[in-house]
Image (cartoon, helix red, strand yellow):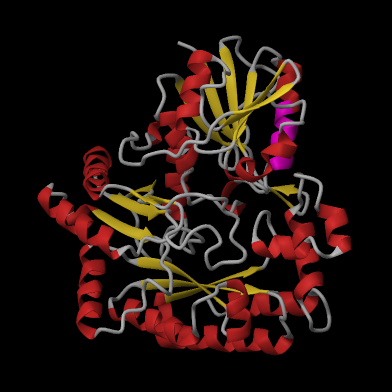
Amino acid sequence: MDKSLIIIPADYFRGELQTGWASLWAEWLPIGPLSVASNNSHNTMVIDEAITPDYIDYNNFSDDIEDIGFWVSIGNYQTVLERSRLIRESAPWVRIGWGGPYCHIMWKKMIERPEVDWICYGYGEEAWERVLKEGLNKDIPNIVYTEEGELIVTHQKLRDLRTLKKPNFDLLPDLEIRKKYFMEEEEHCGVGIPGVDYEGWQILSMISADGCPVGPQGRCTFCTRGEEAYIVHGAEVYAKNIKEYIEKYGKIIISEICDDFMNRGFLRNLDKELTKQNVPRDKFYIDFCFGSVGFLTIRDRKKKKEFIELLKALNIRRVFIGYEHRVQEQLDIVKGGINLEQQDEATDLLLEAGIAIDAAFLLSVPGETELTMEIVYNYAKELKNKGGDKIRIRRQVLILIPPSALWQKGLKDPQFKEKFGDTALLDIWELTKATIELFYEGKNKPGEVYKYFNKLEELN
């Protein structure tokens, strides 16, 4: 049986590799690469170099490793290039493939690189299995490669979450390291809830849907999704997976990573399936999931009460909400169709249900000034006063990332376009500074923006 690896290189930020608990993704298990590795007949391990940076000796690859796939993001692309060059030198027989979210949007530039043999520009479960089994050919979906100088772009195909095998976390050698970090961490930055005792619980990731229910960039002008259908996982299969994970690990903490978990139809069906399949509800919690203000706005008191009871029944203890801004003009720019009243209604619903909220805000959106940031800060302070420990403030300085609508807006600026418009090798720190320069209309760039960035964090 051929041996293969999927490697997730660490991100670069301000010239340094983000490893260990400094990594933004330390608490999130890499469910995408694990799904690819779990849905093939080959011996594929998933190596996350943010957690195990020295796991692989790039100067000493075994002869029986024939395929290596890199999971590419905007933050780790520089590391991917460096690692791929090392493999070209030390193990020239290895076929190198790139996949992941950044490849979906940048494959046209990436395929020109000599460091890569093929790119997956869509979902990779079928592509990885078939490339390893059949070699590169035009019948395999979602791949790009060159053959005798000709660029081959195969047909696109969506995956079906209802038929895929669930991720096998045994393919992740760092699982015990993550678990140790997770148990020892008191001020969790991601999945865990600060102050909760997680001793004896296994953290894992699940996904209930692909795509976004309002469509790619349907509301969020910072959204980087390409065209992608919204496909909901079958509640029967989802409940079955929870039950099997409990049977394997005992007690589990779920990080649910779909764009919006507040699909009431799916949640009702999941509640029924958990009962039907006798899933022990004291053996799992959902301690992280995304929820939109729009889906959480329920004005009918009876329906609101039913929804609160449903959220409680599903053991949802924390929801991440992108409030984004508190000035309507700025909110309309970054997330259309949402108003300030809906923000308040969503907050009240979750707090009434006893559910913790990660309240996320963006700074340096178009038209930002010191006054608008002060309004955001004051609202975040009100949230903390209202919810206490149930509210955690998350803050982010806006970063222009392709192919978002705001990225397209940035390209209209000649200096921005000259610096970033014709390359896939984008530096997150440089992009952040450029975004502030483009959109912040106050004085003291970027100092004033980071003053409020730090003030928001101090609320926690």
* Quadrant housing residue 38: top left
Give percent across and percent down for residue 274: 17, 52
* Quadrant housing residue 342: bottom left
Find out whether residue 22 is within the magenta segment.
no
Is residue 434 found left or right of 247 in the rendered image?
right
Query: Which residue occupies 32% across, 58% down?
Result: 286
Q: Nearer the viewer, residue 148 or 366?
A: 148
Q: Nearer the viewer, residue 99 or 112?
A: 112
Query: Which residue occupies 51% across, 22% down?
Result: 139
Q: Residue 172, can we see it? A: no
The region drawn magenta spans 77-84
Find out whether residue 83 is within the magenta segment.
yes
Query: Which residue occupies 51% across, 61% down?
Result: 189
Q: Is residue 99 above or below residue 411?
A: above
Q: Quadrant of the N terminus?
A: top left
Q: Residue 137, can we see it? A: yes
Q: Nearer the viewer, residue 171 or 126?
A: 126
Give percent across and percent down for residue 216: 53, 57
Report the label total.
0
- Please identify the dominant SS of the magenta region: helix
Query: Which residue occupies 58% across, 47% down?
Result: 20
Q: Is residue 7 above or below residue 216?
A: above
